[in-house]
Amino acid sequence: MNDYWCIPKKQDAEFVANMEDVLEVYERPYNKDFPVVCMDEKPYQLLGDVRTPLPMRPGDDKKIDSEYERHDTCSIFTMVEPLTGKQHISPRPRRTSLDWADEIKYLCDTMYPDATKIVLVMDNLNTHVIGSLYKRFKPVEARRLAKKLEVHYTPKHGSWLNMAEIEINVLTRQCLNRRIPSMEKLKKEIQVWSNDRNKKPVPIHWHFTTSMARIKLVSLYPNLPQ
């Protein structure tokens, strides 16, 4: 049996620098004018049933045939504010730079229109760059959105540092752990789940700090000469 992990290199100064940067962000107190938001994307396979499932009966579980139809793939954009539990889930057919730019506009203008600066934590996927805003919007608009962001990147092989992954795991367990055949149905199911969760938001309590990292992950830090 194998366990799959994101394993960084030993004595990786770049990993450590990005990790400590993100951990420092997570130690900031709540400030509505400078909300900390984590963003991530989940690939998702749309699947349909070949045979109609047999419904549940008293004393008998619902029966689903093991054979299924592959339909299409999509990407589920997830944004969560850990300190409040406020979140936004957006399924899209693709995860291009233009899709990311549209999500950033929603983040700035719909989720936090009054924020002075949005502190955004995400991985360093090649679409997650300010240049993507300029691919999607005119320069004045792209610059306006860019100025509203304070971006912090998780290190390569450090996806566990992105708290959006926690929200994605909850979404997967509670909503996506079944076959969903189409984008239309996926959007409806996620919208219902997201609306219900936002009515009773669940903050994320992050306990791993920089001081803990310097002890527990000491092998990642460069071995400096004495």
Image: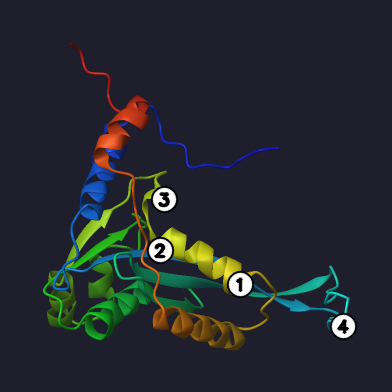
Q: Looking at the rendering, which quadrant does residue 11 occupy?
A: top left
Which residue sits at x=74%, y=78%?
48
Disc 3 marks a residue whose amino acid type is Ser
Report the front residue among 130 and 64: 64
The Cα–Cα distance between marks 1 and 3, rounded to whole angstroms, is: 20 Å
- Mark closer to the observer (4, 1): 4
Apparent side of residue 55 relative to residue 15 in the rendered image (left or right): right
Residue 96 appears in the picture as rendered: no
- Mark closer to the observer (4, 3): 4
* Cβ atoms under marks 2 and 3 closer than 8 Å: yes
Q: Looking at the rendering, which quadrant does residue 78 occupy?
A: bottom left
**Which residue is label 3 attached to?**
159
The answer to whether 119 is drawn above or below residue 14 in the figure is below
Q: Position of residue 113 (x, y in %)?
A: 19, 83
Which residue sits at x=15%, y=82%?
114
Which of marks 1 and 2 precedes in the sequence? 2
Disc 2 marks a residue whose amino acid type is Asp
Which of marks 3 and 1 precedes in the sequence? 3
Which of marks 3 and 4 precedes in the sequence? 4
Q: Position of residue 85 (x, y in %)?
A: 35, 70
The answer to whether 203 is drawn above or below residue 142 in the figure is above
Q: SS of the residue at dot 2?
A: strand
Which of marks 1 and 4 precedes in the sequence? 4
**Which residue is label 4 attached to?**
57
* Cβ atoms under marks 4 and 2 closer than 8 Å: no
Report the front residue among 177 and 145: 177
Q: SS of the residue at dot 4?
A: loop
Which of marks 2 and 4 precedes in the sequence? 2
Where residue 40 is drawn, which disc sits there? Answer: 2
- The residue carrying pointer 2 sits among few (fewer than 14), some (14 to 19) or many (20 or more) residues within 10 Å by Cα, namely many
